[in-house]
Image: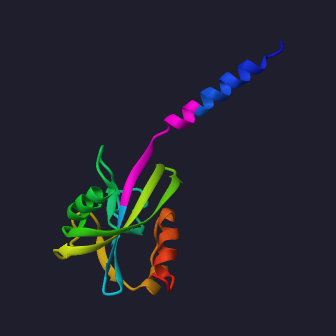
Amino acid sequence: MELCQACFTSVGDLIISFVAMEKIIEAVAAVIQKDGKFLITKRLETSPMGHCWEFPGGKREADETIEACAIRECMEEIGVTIKTVRYLQDQFYDYPHGKIHLHFVLCQIVSGEPQTLQCREVRWIEPHQFIDFEFPPADREVIGMLTSPTV
């Protein structure tokens, strides 16, 4: 039996359509800086990669801007009001628990003191200390940027 080229095109289109339908989680990470230090939080043990440290943040809600997500997540996770300073970069990463599109935003605290509301620990660290903490792979590039002498 011989298959025509049109069959291969249809199958290819089907595969492309299936891949395009795969859900990508949109998320924001608030890179909070103060006096040359960065705020990091330890993930909850029950969350994926619960052994890792991260920047505060989380999933974007439908129709939520990147800035609004950073502000909401910082209030929910660590109880502070922030303002966004500038967009840093974004990363796509394919984790075992899902594909993520993570936006990194440089932020400053406007009011409040960081608390452990939805995380296990909160720490202020200097750029050279990032190496002492385990972060999710999607954070590596932005950490490299933050530890370079040009930031």
Left or right: 83, with 145 as reference point: left
Q: Give the vertical position of 132 relative to 136 (above or below).
A: below
Residue 139 in the image, given as x and y percentages of width and height: 47, 67
Task: Compare residues 100 and 44 and report the one nearer the observer.
Answer: 100
Q: Give the vertical position of 52 relative to 17 (above or below).
A: below
Residue 39 in the image, given as x and y percentages of width and height: 32, 76
For the C terminus, which image quadrant? Answer: bottom left
Query: Bounds of the magenta span?
Result: 17-28
The total number of labels drawn is: 0
Q: In which quarter of the image is residue 4?
A: top right
Residue sitting at the far front = 86
Residue sitting at the far right = 1
Q: Give the vertical position of 140 relative to 150 (above or below).
A: above
Residue placed at 26% from the left, 57% from the top? 68
Task: Compare residues 52 and 93 and report the one nearer the observer.
Answer: 93
Q: Quadrant of residue 63?
A: top left
Residue 95 in the image, given as x and y percentages of width and height: 51, 53
Residue sitting at the far left = 112
Task: Compare residues 66 and 53 and report the one nearer the observer.
Answer: 66
Residue placed at 47% from the left, 72% from the top? 134
Residue placed at 36% from the left, 59% from the top? 28
Residue placed at 49% from the left, 83% from the top? 150
Would residue 42 be seen by someone viewing this image from the given angle?
A: no
Q: For residue 3: magenta?
A: no
